[in-house]
Amino acid sequence: MSITSFHPPVRILMGPGPSDVNPRILEAMSRPTIGHLDPIFIAMMDEMKGLLQYAFQTKNELTFSVSAPGSAGMETCFVNLLEPGDKVIICQNGVFGGRMKENAERCGAVPILVQDPWGAAVDPHKLEETLKSHPDAKVVAFVHAETSTGACSDVKTLVEIAHRNDCLTIVDTVTSLGGSPLKVDEWGIDAVYSGSQKCLSCTPGLSPVSFSERAAERIRTRQTKVQSWFLDLNLVMGYWGGGGKRAYHHTAPINALYGLHEALVLLQEEGLEKAWERHQRNHQALGAGIEAMGLRFVVKEEERLPQLNAIAIPEGIDDTTVRTRLLQEYGLEIGAGLGEMAGKIWRVGLMGYGSNPRNVLVFLGALEAVLH
Ligand code: PLP
């Protein structure tokens, strides 16, 4: 039997990401592939830098998209800002803080963990106390929007504390960019990374990043070589660094970048504040429906993310049966709990293009039908 073309079904993606991709992005990605050093492509990359600066609310010169998923954005920040023996404080309140620790260890750095309960925001007082015991720490890292639990942390306050202790900051905004207020310059973030597949509604596989001048200086003045050739920003800067010159570093994922460009154009057309408001509005609508069904959110109201809704699975309900029926009968994907939340929560994404009233109603209707 010969294998034929792959035709995936149409789904409604309401999990933790990828989110539904805007058809305009898919159309943009099907445009002709041109060379990545073609002047027309380079002009598009220059535009993309401006669009990313808008999305991140920064003037950082070193703002670009890593040619790999969010985890590579995370790794880019860690391998470039940490050297062997450096102490890094990592605030962990879910799965992704754990991945940060892994990264730090593989850099030969010394991670100090500040633990908070899963489902709660990072506690600024704990960070403050930890820094008193570790005044030699060089970097503080934490997740803005913890996708594994739906909790949002107070970036501005955490960055202020880190800076008072002379630490650089690495902030994970994979799930927040485009969905929740994020102001890189105003809040003074030094290194930030995100992902294309959440509130930007692009296909997965790209990681927008941005570095402050202070962070870029730390990278330029390292004592040791960055252990990863591909992610070494001293080399990548030759391609993305501006000044009009773009030297070959790796073959850019050309059509994927058309998609990200379109996603960012869409964000600019809507306006960042309007996008944040829309995410909030649809989250409120979902919340009203959830409560009317006698269900409850896991995260307390003031720390809830609008784009990732963690719902406690009611007593006596089988997690897998519900998610399987939603997928098979309604073509609707929601997420399972991760780690210690496995079997206890459902994660319902209202991200980017997928944050709309239709998805809210389809989910509530389908869940009601499956539960009763
Ligand atoms: N950080 C957070 C908060 C995430 O939610 C994710 C992915 O879900 C990642 C990092 C890793 O991104 P990726 O799966 O694109 O590598």
Image (spheres, rainbow, N blue to C red):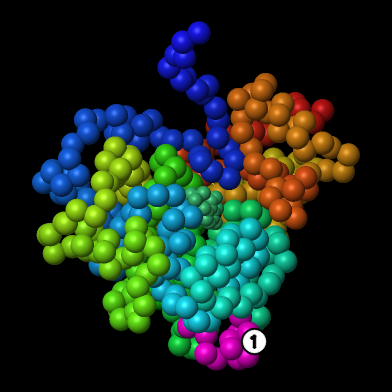
Residue 77 image offset from top left, x and y in percent: 42, 66
Q: In this view, does 370 lie to the left or right of 185?
A: right
Does residue 106 show up magenta in the picture?
Answer: no
Q: Residue 207 location in percent, x, y? A: 40, 53
What's the residue at 30%, 81% (across, down)? 221
Where, quadrant-wise, is the C terminus in this rendering? top right
Q: Determine whether the residue tagged by mark 1 lies in a helix, strand or loop.
A: helix
Residue bounds of the magenta highlight: 127-138
Give the image quarter of residue 17: top right
Question: At 52% across and 76% down in the image, what residue appears?
Answer: 109
- Kind of residue indicated by mark 1: Glu
Please provide percent x and percent y for residue 311: 72, 47
The x, y position of residue 65, in whole percent, is 33, 54
**In this rendering, position of residue 82 left or right of residue 210:** right
In this view, the residue in front, 339 or 348, is 339
Q: Name the residue under label 1.
A: 129
Q: Which residue is drawn at 71% across and 53% down?
A: 339
Quarter-of-image position of residue 215: bottom left
